[in-house]
């Protein structure tokens, strides 16, 4: 038995949320519980989709926060309402493939040592027929551990984890934009076991503007904040910290067209 944890806020689109929820109900292994956190007041259109889905699906719990608190805080609150040990994450504008949960839950059944299981994702524009890249990750724990010192080791929207292990690590830390990466390195530092399925289980919605948002000094500051956190908990050394800062400075401050090429052709498959 497992829960699915989602968070939605007012800037998201109702049609994307509907597609996301439909992909959950179309699973070969349906979730036993869906916990949807409303991160502050929503638009009437979003509320309409949520109300409609909740009427049809009694397994859905809606947790309403009076104010927008950000993804990390919303997910930490949602975790309190998840009834089962296994929790699957999902973003409310993405689309899960029909066998996603069947494949990932099987990993935990066959490999009880696994605490976090993610997978590859396919990034798409507008509809799933327009896949522009596949975000692949290392499969086995030793490779994931090495990879995590320089890049995020899992695809957050395609992750299933053991709730108790996340809570033991302190939940999502207050690191804006990098709450998930901060959580993963904290769990890895505590000895949690990770595994990534070597196949895509989810369509991840993106746009040509995505790479533009991944540049500039504000982005650099947030990344340095994350790297400082990784150094403070002993996950990376000072030399690795300096190396990461230097590389990220170059990438974040280069022209958008060059950064886009690097992401799509060098950092994706």
Image (spheres, rainbow, N blue to C red):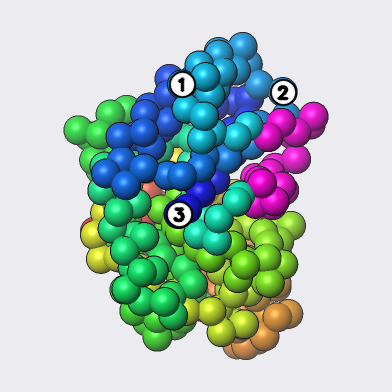
Rounded to the nearest whole Å, what is the CA distance between mark 3 and mark 1? 20 Å
- Which residue position holds label 2? 41
Q: In the rendering, at what x and y percent does residue 9 appear?
A: 63, 30
- Which residue position holds label 1? 56
Rounded to the nearest whole Å, what is the CA distance between mark 3 and mark 2? 31 Å
Question: Within 10 Å of the Cα at label 2, are there few (<14), some (14-19), or many (20+) other Cα atoms?
Answer: some
Q: Which residues are magenta?
A: 63-81
Camera-near label (3 vs 2) is: 3
The residue positioned 70% from the left and 51% from the top of the image is 80
- Which residue position holds label 3? 1
The residue positioned 28% from the left and 58% from the top of the image is 103
Magenta stretch containing residue 80, yes or no? yes
Q: Quadrant of residue 263?
A: bottom left
Camera-near label (1 vs 2) is: 1
SS category of the residue bearing label 1: helix
Question: Within 10 Å of the Cα at label 1, are there few (<14), some (14-19), or many (20+) other Cα atoms?
Answer: few
């Amino acid at each position: 038995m497992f829960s699915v944890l989602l968070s939605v806020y007012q800037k998201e689109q109702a049609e994307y949320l509907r597609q996301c929820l439909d992909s959950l109900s179309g699973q070969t292994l349906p979730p036993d519980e869906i916990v949807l956190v409303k991160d502050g007041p929503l638009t009437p259109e979003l509320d309409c989709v949520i109300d409609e889905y909740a009427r049809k699906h009694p397994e859905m719990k809606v947790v309403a926060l009076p104010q927008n608190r950000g993804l990390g805080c919303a997910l930490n609150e949602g975790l309190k309402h998840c009834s089962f040990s296994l929790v699957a994450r999902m973003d409310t504008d993405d689309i899960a493939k029909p066998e996603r949960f069947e494949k990932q839950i099987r990993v935990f059944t066959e490999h009880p040592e696994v605490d976090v299981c993610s997978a590859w994702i396919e990034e798409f524009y507008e509809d799933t027929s327009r896949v522009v890249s596949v975000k692949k990750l290392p499969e086995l724990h030793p490779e994931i551990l090495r990879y995590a010192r320089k890049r995020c080791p899992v695809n957050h929207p395609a992750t299933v984890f053991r709730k108790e292990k996340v809570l033991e690590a302190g939940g999502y830390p207050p690191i804006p934009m990098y709450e998930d990466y901060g959580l993963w390195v904290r769990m890895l530092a505590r000895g949690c076991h990770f595994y990534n399925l070597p196949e895509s289980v989810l369509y991840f919605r993106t746009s040509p503007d995505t790479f533009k948002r991944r540049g500039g000094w504000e982005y650099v500051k947030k990344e340095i904040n994350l790297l400082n956190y990784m150094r403070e908990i002993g996950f990376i050394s000072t030399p690795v910290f300096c190396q990461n800062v230097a590389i990220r400075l170059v990438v974040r401050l280069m022209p958008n067209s060059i950064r886009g090429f690097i992401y799509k052709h060098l950092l994706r498959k």
